[in-house]
Image (cartoon, grey):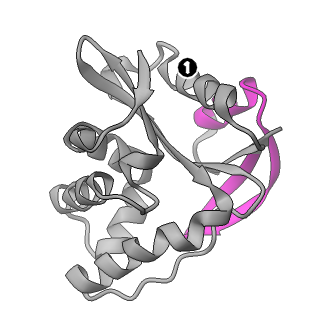
């Protein structure tokens, strides 16, 4: 079952988010510390009005357990949603990080999509994307790591097309869009 996320899903969703953006979170906190990175994501997910908030998320639940998540928001809101994240990072870690814009106005941006490892290959990621397609009122965009061809194949199979390469936090990604 797919449903809107709630703040109480934070402990289940944070490890999924980490799975989707491990290197970026490490850059945010300035160290490779898995538990601390997940704790940051859990804190952000449980709060309102930031790009990683439960307000922007849907979860795939099976047997009362969250096994997949998708976070998406209107690209025109990136700066507003990112500001609380950057402020928290500066306050807690003393890092004044600057990140490239990963999206822009005119698209509903999928920030993270992740499925628990033991549940992968069952169509859960596809179901979450299809759900988003059903409620989207604008094109859907996302970034996929250039070194993750399996994920790129999933997205192209679902109708996404390549638009350009995008740098983000020291990595190189392909920007894909579904119209």
Total marks shown come to 1
**Does the stretch in magenta take in 172?**
yes
Q: Is residue 130 visible?
A: yes
Q: In the image, is 136 to the left or to the right of 6?
A: right
Q: Position of residue 152 (x, y in %)?
A: 66, 37
Q: Position of residue 163 (x, y in %)?
A: 83, 52
Q: Which residue is mark 1?
A: 127
Position of the N terminus by quadrant: top left
Say which of 49 and 154 sits in front: 49
Q: Dividing the picture into quarters, in which one does residue 132 lie?
A: top right
Query: Magenta segment range?
Result: 150-176
- Residue at 19 percent across and 57 percent down: it is 39
Q: Dividing the picture into quarters, in which one does residue 29 lie?
A: bottom left
Q: Position of residue 65 (x, y in %)?
A: 24, 21
For numbered disc 1, what is the local secondary structure? helix
Q: Position of residue 171 (x, y in %)?
A: 56, 65
Q: Is residue 169 visible?
A: no
Position of the C terminus by quadrant: top right
- Residue at 43 percent across and 64 percent down: it is 24
- Residue at 38 percent across and 71 percent down: it is 85
- Residue at 26 percent across and 73 percent down: it is 31
Q: In the image, is 177 to the left or to the right of 58?
A: right
**Does the stretch in magenta take in 70?**
no
Q: Dividing the picture into quarters, in which one does residue 159 lie?
A: top right
> Can you say whether 75 is above or below 179 in the image?
below
């Amino acid at each position: 079952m797919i449903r809107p996320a709630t703040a109480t899903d934070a402990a289940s969703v944070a490890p999924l988010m980490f799975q989707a953006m491990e290197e970026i979170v490490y850059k945010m906190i300035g160290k490779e510390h898995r538990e601390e990175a997940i704790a940051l994501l859990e804190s952000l997910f449980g709060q309102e009005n930031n790009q990683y908030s439960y307000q922007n998320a849907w979860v795939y639940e099976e047997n009362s357990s969250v096994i997949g998540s998708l976070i998406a928001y209107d690209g025109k809101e990136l700066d507003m949603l990112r500001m609380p994240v950057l402020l928290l990072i500066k306050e807690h870690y003393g890092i004044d990080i600057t990140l490239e814009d990963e999206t822009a106005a005119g698209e509903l941006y999928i920030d993270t999509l992740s499925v628990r490892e033991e549940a992968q290959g069952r169509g859960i990621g596809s179901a979450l994307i299809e759900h988003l397609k059903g409620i989207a009122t604008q094109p859907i965009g996302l970034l996929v790591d250039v070194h993750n061809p399996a994920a790129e194949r999933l997205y192209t199979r679902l109708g996404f097309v390549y638009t350009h390469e995008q740098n983000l936090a020291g990595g190189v990604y392909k920007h894909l869009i579904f119209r």
